[in-house]
Amino acid sequence: MTDPRKPIFDAVRAAVPGVWGDPHNIQAMDNLLDAYGVPRASGEMRVSPAGIKLIQDFEGFAKALPDGRVQAYPDPATGGAPWTIGWGTTGPDVRAGTVWTRDQAQKRFEAHVSEFANGVTRALAGSATTQSEFDAMVSLAYNVGLANFSSSTLLKKHKAGDKVGAKAEFARWNKAAGKVMAGLTRRRAAEAALYGA
């Protein structure tokens, strides 16, 4: 897979270290490059319905109100930031008191997943990846962040072709604020199963 955008992203990464820790920056750069007609990578992968279902099943549509809207809730590990809404959406516009319609939450989820899919595609740098592997890694990145995913041993092993080793790495990502979380343990097991499917 050739990515004509990679040199541009690499230059920005070198000029502004840490810029891709926020997936909104990736989407903003992609939007700018779209506007200038810079093509995307050939064969760029998208999350399948199975991947979407896995993410939504584990993120849940928490704090749904009786009228169908949804309200923001605090991070379970910190009791505060990052505030989350809908299917795991975070960002500067999500804070205590934020309320969205289900349609707003769905549109934001779709945009958010697309941002993470683009970020994972870049991090993979053309390494051989099946749809199931891709879906599992996007789910992980969606939960732990692109910066963490991009520097992970899991990604290094995957890119080196050590699929057994990469699959085993999912289990290591079951903590939040240093505490093992039962929900994260279940999610990592489901992601590992999808990765190995």
Image: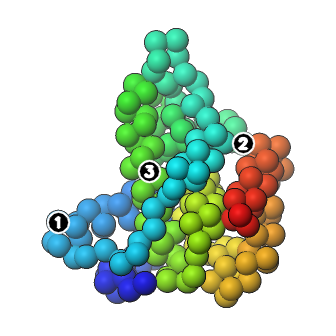
154 or 40: nearer the viewer: 40
- Mark 1 neighbour class, 10 Å CA radius: few under 14, some 14 to 19, many 20 or more: few
Which residue shows up at 58% across the image and 60% down it?
Answer: 135
Residue 91 position in % (x across, y down): 45, 46
Cα distance in 3D space between marks 1 and 2: 39 Å
Residue occupied by mark 3:
112
Which residue shows up at 45% across the image and 68% down it?
Answer: 45
83 or 60: nearer the viewer: 60
The amino acid pointed to by label 1 is Ala
Cα distance in 3D space between marks 3 and 2: 22 Å
Q: Is residue 148 above or below residue 181?
A: below
The amino acid pointed to by label 2 is Ala
| Residue lying farthest to the left in this orientation | 36
The amino acid pointed to by label 3 is His
Q: Is residue 15 visible?
A: no
Point out the tag, 3 or 2, that comes first from the N-terminus.
2
Which residue shows up at 23% across the image and 71% down it?
Answer: 33
Residue occupied by mark 1:
35
Q: Is residue 61 visible?
A: yes
Residue occupied by mark 2:
77
Residue 176 position in % (x across, y down): 74, 50
